[in-house]
Amino acid sequence: MINTVLGPISEDELGITLMHEHIVVDITGAEKSLEKPYSVEEVVDYVLPFLMDAKNKGCQTIVEATPLGLGRDLEVLVECSKRSGLNIITCTGAWDGADVKGLSVPKDIQDMTIAEITNVWTKEFEEGIDDTGIKPGYIKLALGDEGKIFPLQEKMLRAAARTSNKTGMFIACHIWASVSLPLVVEILEEENVPYERFIWVHADGQMDMEKILEYGKKGIWLEFDTIGAAEDFKKFPPAIKKLQEENLIPQLLFGQDSGSFWIKEGDEDWPMRPYARFFNEFVPFCEKEGLKKEFFMKVLEENSKRVLM
C-alpha cells in the first residue's frame, strides 16, 4: 500500500503520476512558515483549476515535494485531494537547497542528533504526522547545491538513510550541482542504502550526462523534473534518447517542479507553473523530436509505480 494524504491506496490506483510538484511553498524560512499568512480556502481556490487541468489530461497522482519548513501544509493538501479527486502523496524530510544555509530547516531538526531526527521521521511514517494520522510516502531532502555537503546536510542525509532502512521509504534528494552527487552516494553507501531507494532529483538540472549514465547504471533513479520552469525543452529529447540507447529508461522518472502558491519576501511576481504543462507543451514538443506520447505515459505510470510501491 502507498500512503496518500487521504489514506493508503494500492499501487493499481496510482495511475499516471507526476513525481515532483508543489502546492504551497514558503521560502521565508522554517520558523516564519509556521505563521501561514493565508487561508486554506484561498490556496485551494487558486490551485484547484491547475490541478483539474492536469487531471483532465489523465494525471491521477501528484507527489508533493514540500517538506516541513518549506511550507508543507497538510490541511491544504487534504482539501486539494478531496476537491480534485487526485491522489496526493506528502513527504517527511527537510530542505536545504540553494545557498540558504539552513533557513528552511526547522530549528528543532537542526538541534537534533542523527538518531533523534531518524526517530522523528520514522514516527511520522509509522504513526502519522503530528496528530493528523497522515503518513508520508517518502523522504524529501535538498542539499549539495554549493558543491559540498555541509555538516547539517550530512546529518540530514544520514538520518534520511537510516529512516529509509527502517521504513523502506525512498529518498528523493534535490541535488542541482552534479559534482555533489558522488559525495551523497558515498554517504548512502556507508549507510547501506540500496541504490534503487534513491532518486536524484533535478538530474536534468545541469544535464551532466556523464554522471547521469554512471549513476543510472548503478541503479539510482534519475528524475527529469525542471520542465515546469524551463524556457524551452531542447535539452530533453537528446538526453532521453541517450537513456534509451543505454537501456536506462527503467531508471527514469518525470516531474515538473511545478506550482505553487508562493510565500516569499518582497513584491516579485512568481507565477504559477501549471501542472498540465507536461501534457500540454512538453509531450507535444518531444513528439516532434521523434518520441511518442505512449512512451511518456508508460514512464509516468510504470516507473512511478515501481519506485513508490
Image (cartoon, helix red, strand yellow):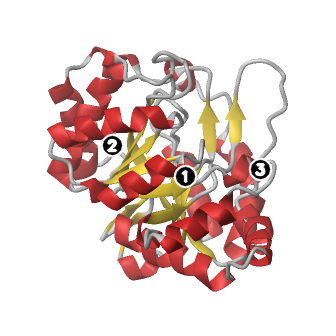
Please state which amino acid type lies under the numbered disc 3. Tyr
Q: Residue at x 15, y 28 (%)?
A: 115
- Residue 8 in percent (x, y) is at 35, 68
- Which sits earlier in the primary sequence, circle 2 or circle 3? 3
Q: Which residue is mark 2?
A: 131
In this rendered view, identify the residue nearer to me: 18 or 41. Answer: 18
Task: Please state which of the two labelled residues, at mark 1 or mark 2, is closer to the viewer.
Answer: 1
Residue 15 visible in the current orientation: no
Could you tell me which secondary element the residue under label 3 belongs to?
Answer: helix
Q: Residue at x 42, y 65 (%)?
A: 251
Q: Which residue is mark 3?
A: 46
- Residue 132 in percent (x, y) is at 37, 47
Indicate which disc residue 77 carries: 1
Asked whether, in this view, residue 204 is left or right of residue 153, the answer is right
Task: Please state which of the two labelled residues, at mark 2 or mark 3, is closer to the viewer.
Answer: 3
Asked whether, in this view, residue 9 is left or right of residue 14, the answer is left
Q: Residue at x 45, y 47 (%)?
A: 211
Quadrant location, the C terminus:
bottom left
Label pair 2/3, CB-CB below 8 angstroms: no
- Residue 233 in percent (x, y) is at 75, 57
- Which sits earlier in the primary sequence, circle 1 or circle 2? 1
